[in-house]
Image (tube, grey):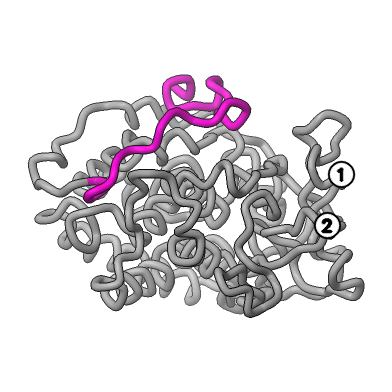
Amino acid sequence: MQDCTMADDANPTTADDQSTAGSYVTPGTEFTRDARYIATRITADGRDGYPVEAGRYRLVVSRACPWANRAIIVRRLLGLEDAISMGVAGPTHDARSWTFDLDPGGVDPVLGIPRLQDAFFARFPDYERGITVPAFVDETTGQVVTNDYAQMTLDMSTEWTAHHREGAPDLYPEALRAEIDEVALAVFKDVNNGVYRCGFAGSQEAYDKAYDRLFDRLDWLSERLSTQRYLVGDTITEADVRLFTTLVRFDAVYHGHFKCNRSKLTEMPVLWDYARDLFQTPGFGDTIDFEHIKQHYYVVHTDINPTSIVPKGPDLSGWLQPHDRAALGGRPFGDGTAPGPVRPGEEVDLQHSAEAMRG
């Protein structure tokens, strides 16, 4: 079953299983993440046939999706807006994948297609896996290049350096890569994927196991972040980006919708301060569309929310409240600088912002 990525497919079978009314839960089983992505990479040397080239590739995302949100943040922090265009799909999808229903006529203005699946089928006519975001599409051919979300953000940091803005931070510093990878893997297994293992659990045993792992890891993260501002080193890294996109969705959807309800994020003081620190950092909170997030989870997952009713709450205005994380030191962008204003046309609707979402 498809959600933001095929990794949310518990048991992908037919196209019908990718519908808005499809099934994400297999009774009696635990949720298993399908990680079969298109492994093609865009690299400086073009070894896979896709060299780094400004203006050639379009990043297709949905603001609802935590995995796509990573790519939106990294693109913005590194200042790759001029080099990589961005297409935004709507927050929900049906049996034929993500649609460009936010664009005039329901067609992506650059790719000229109504559905992301068209780019996948242009390269792989018999493609049978999930049509997923984020995805890089080659504008010259209209074909998908890759949907390997974990590698995409790392490559934006390491392969696209010639197109980084002046003052771009180093989100994947070579000296810290082993530790970043170690922390990010733990976060992925127990938190990023952990909330899905709770929400899509097909048995009480599977749910209990995922729930315990999730909150054990959140407690571990709280302890780690009680004495340091960021996860690895004294600057923002890829590890922080990966944790943030789950934390920012926690109270809005994961606490209730996915039954991750031991504590709200607002009831975990260290993580709440940490998340607000990042949210209020340019490049993070200005990418978050809370309305899209809520619409996606509550409308698409009809087997765990059959009425598709979207809650009015919670009050999300607390994201703008002060935090004391600066007292821990650290330099958000290291030797670099904050990104400038959001590119015109890429702003989040103000009615979908934290300030507007008061429940």
Seen at 24% across and 73% down, the residue is 175
* Circle 1 residue: 112
**Residue 60 visible in the displayed image:** no
Give the percent coordinates (x, y) of residue 283.
Answer: 41, 39
Sequence-earlier tag: 2 or 1: 1
Identify which amino acid the numbered label 1 is placed on. Answer: Gly
Q: Is residue 196 magenta?
A: no
Q: Is residue 355 magenta?
A: yes
Is 281 above or below relative to 235? above
CB under 8 Å between discs 2 and 1: yes
Left or right, 167 with reference to 327: right
Identify which amino acid the numbered label 2 is placed on. Answer: Gly
Q: Secondary structure at mark 1?
A: loop
**Residue 309 visible in the displayed image:** yes
Viewer-side residue, 169 vs 242: 169
Viewer-side residue, 149 vs 344: 344
Q: Secondary structure at mark 2?
A: loop
For residue 142, the mark is 2
Which residues lie in the magenta part? 332-359
Seen at 90% across and 75% down, the residue is 126
For residue 226, the mark is none
Badge 1: residue crowd in 10 Å (few <14, some 14–19, many ≥20): few
Q: Quadrant of the N terminus?
A: bottom right
Overall secondary structure of the magenta stretch?
Answer: loop
Give the percent coordinates (x, y) of residue 61.
Answer: 64, 49
